Image (cartoon, rainbow, N blue to C red):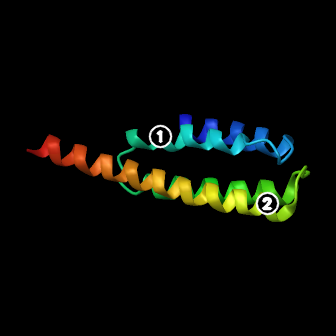
Amino acid sequence: MYIIISTAIICYVDIVTPIGLAVWLLYFFPLFLTIYLSWKYAPFLAAGVFTILSFVDFIVSPSRYSPVFELTNRIFFAAVLFVGAYFIYWMIQFTDRQLSH
């Protein structure tokens, strides 16, 4: 529930804030909350949803900078999100193995 609420708040703030500000970094907080979910692929689903929301924001928000710069910024963010999701997935797998032994 906290993931959905925080995602909605961050998405709203991201849309009303000009693109030049890195509000999208806040999506890492709900991504880290996926550690507490029982589905092991939840970090990847969350990273995908956050990436889509980030690109929606790119389309609807006013820009201060070049669109190429902003698009590159969002692509880099998506890559970092999925790397973070992989590390969370790995940590969940490692924790599950430790608990089962």
Q: Position of residue 45 (x, y in %)?
A: 51, 58
What residue is shown with label 2?
A: 69
Left or right? Give the position of 10 relative to 86: right
Residue at position x 70%, y 58% in the image: 74
Q: Residues within 10 Å of mark 1 (few under 14, many from 20)?
A: some
Q: Which mark is residue 73?
A: none
Left or right? Give the position of 51 relative to 2: right
Location of residue 78 (image quadrant): bottom right
Q: Where's the C terminus, which quadrant?
A: top left
Q: Which mark is residue 32?
A: 1
Along the line of sight, the residue nearer the viewer: 48 or 66: 66
Q: Residues within 10 Å of mark 2 (few under 14, many from 20)?
A: few
How far apart marks 2 and 1 lie (CA) works out to 27 Å
Left or right? Give the position of 73 relative to 27: right
Residue at position x 15%, y 43% in the image: 98
Residue at position x 79%, y 41% in the image: 21
Q: Earlier in the sequence, mark 2 or mark 1?
A: 1
Residue type at the position of mark 2: Phe
Residue type at the position of mark 1: Phe
Q: Secondary structure at mark 1?
A: helix
Q: Is residue 90 visible?
A: yes
Q: Position of residue 36 (x, y in %)?
A: 39, 38
Q: Is residue 1 visible?
A: no
Along the line of sight, the residue nearer the viewer: 21 or 99: 21
Q: Where's the N terminus, which quadrant?
A: top right
Residue at position x 77%, y 43% in the image: 14
